Image (cartoon, helix red, strand yellow):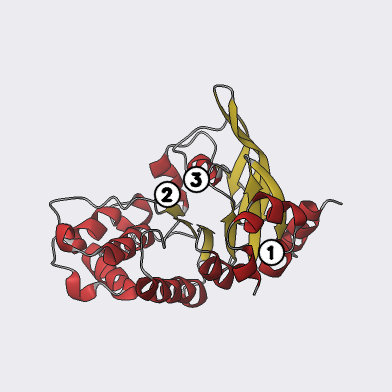
Amino acid sequence: MSETAAVDAQVRGAAGVPLLAVDGVRKRFGGLTAVKGASFTLAAGEIVGILGPNGAGKTTLFNLLTGFIAPDAGSVKLDGHELKGLAPYRIVNRGLARTFQLTRPFLGMSVLENVLVACLAPRVRHRMASEEHARRILDQVGLREKAASPVEVLPYGDLRRLEIARALATDPRLLLLDEPFAGLGSSEIEPLANLIKRLHREENLTILIIEHKLREFMALVSRVIAMDFGEIIAVGTPAEIVRHPRVIEAYIGRTEGDGAAA
């Protein structure tokens, strides 16, 4: 049994069906194969990271999982139900939400109004009072006092929190975070990392995260999926990944490997 298969067998556990099952997902852009037959699983309640150098295919994989790009081959299942071929809004309504590398607030609207838009998702609008739900989410992410503020005046760290708030407002079972610490200073990273840990712990939220800040990334996740040139090259715990020869060659040895392993 391969290393990936062995880890995935452990993830499935007694229940047998993982929350997310990605099987043989492939995507080509002209002559470039951006994702080469990616296969992995996530169990409910996990917090897992995707690691790799620039151009490894991490964000392309996120786009494939969330319907922004259609895969050429393979399967993506959430709780046993196929997502391949669904539009992004339908995938959100199945319980899979994401943030983006670049913050994308709705300009000309307040912080609260931005979150209220997400509350219109069919997944939540028939079950929850929208404004009450939105204010509860803003309280969770530390933006309640800025609910009436125009998004244009928010500092960048708060825009990152707003991205997470809008995703949380759809009541996801699985949250994908694409470089949540990008552009943040050291004083902003720790509070945001604590927020992610708290969401995982208190809300039992399953999280899949891409991040290049290796110290913070390795401290957050319990398992790492390492990619290079569109291929998954290793799966394991952070301690295993920082010592994996292919990962060291592809990424860690060229950047922050010594610091991350310390």
Is residue 187 visible in the rendered image? The answer is: yes
The amino acid type found where label 2 is placed reads Val
Q: On the rendered structure, is 177 left or right of 47?
A: left
Q: Residues within 10 Å of mark 3 (few under 14, many from 20)?
A: some
First in sequence: mark 2 vs mark 3: 3
Where is 147 relative to 69, above or below?
Answer: below
Q: Which residue is mark 2?
A: 92
Q: On the rendered structure, is 199 left or right of 139?
A: right
Rendered location of residue 156, percent (x, y): 27, 62
Q: Which residue is mark 3?
A: 59
- Helix, strand or loop at label 2? It is helix
Q: On the rendered structure, is 115 left or right of 244?
A: left
The amino acid type found where label 1 is placed reads Val
Instruction: Please tell me which residue lies in front, 206 or 164.
Output: 164
First in sequence: mark 2 vs mark 1: 2
The circle drawn on residue 191 is: none
Callout 2 touching callout 3 (CB < 8 Å)? no
- Helix, strand or loop at label 1? It is loop
Which is in the foreground here, disc 2 or disc 1?
1
- Helix, strand or loop at label 3? It is helix
Instruction: Please tell me which residue lies in front, 119 or 210.
Output: 210
Q: Which residue is mark 1?
A: 242
Which is in the foreground here, disc 1 or disc 3?
1
Is residue 42 visible in the rendered image? The answer is: no
